Amino acid sequence: VSSSKQFYGDYLRMQIGRQFYRHMSTLPEIMKTGAAPDYATLFTDPVEADLYTRAQHNGSLATARQLCKYVDFTGMRSLLDIGGGSAAFSIVICRKNLELRARVLELPEVAKTGERIVAGEPAQIASRIED
């Protein structure tokens, strides 16, 4: 169910179904030449970057919630989220730590999707997360 915290439909439908399977057809050429697509190149395309980032978001939220069960962020004032994608980790950690500010470093097109996702958060969360 798409409203579930554990919803992975976007990941399966969009990322696996529309991105990865399409690239699998190039595997024989990659094996011959060693020239594989890389994320920096793939994500210069705004559509590809948006699709991938949105597809990863729910899974990243779930992983970030698990991280917060094992890592105590109490007392920390800032977080540098390198390769932070949709800002899911920053969102979850800032929700649980009201004094924390986060900075997300990401490829430009991925960051645009992350900014839209962060903008959908309540102001007291979104105002503490920078892209």
Image: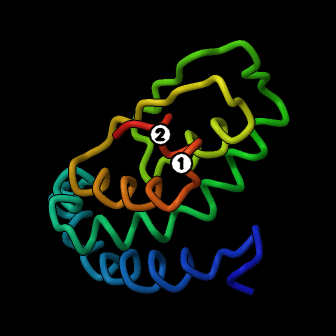
Residue appearing at x 68%, y 41% in the figure: 95
Please name the residue shown 41% across and 63% down the image: 53
* Figure check: 85 above or below 26: above
Height in image: 125 above or below 70? below
Q: Residues within 10 Å of mark 2 (few under 14, many from 20)?
A: few
Structural distance between the alpha carbons of marks 1 and 2:
6 Å
Q: Position of residue 118 (x, y in %)?
A: 47, 53
Does residue 51 appear left or right of residue 93 in this picture? left
Q: Amino acid at mark 1?
A: Ala
Residue 48 x, y percent position in the rendering: 27, 71
Q: Is residue 93 above or below residue 74?
A: below
Residue with the mark numbered 2: 127
On-image quarter of the C terminus: top left
Residue at 38% in and 61% down: 116
Nearest the eye: 125 or 50 = 125
Question: Which mark is drawn over residue 80?
Answer: none
When the figure is inspected, residue 73 is found, relative to residue 66, above or below; the finding is above
Q: Residues within 10 Å of mark 1 (few under 14, many from 20)?
A: few
Give the structural element (helix, strand or loop) at label 1.
Answer: helix
Element carrying mark 2: loop
**Residue lying furthest front:** 123
Q: Specify the quadrant that holds the N terminus.
A: bottom right
Q: Position of residue 129 (x, y in %)?
A: 46, 38
Instruction: Report whether 66 appears left or right of 106.
Output: right
* Mark 1 touches mark 2? (CB < 8 Å): yes
The residue wearing badge 1 is 123
Amino acid residing under circle 2: Ser
x, y percentage for residue 128? 50, 34
Splitting the image into 4 quarters, where does residue 23 fall? bottom left
Where on the picture, by quarter, is residue 51?
A: bottom left
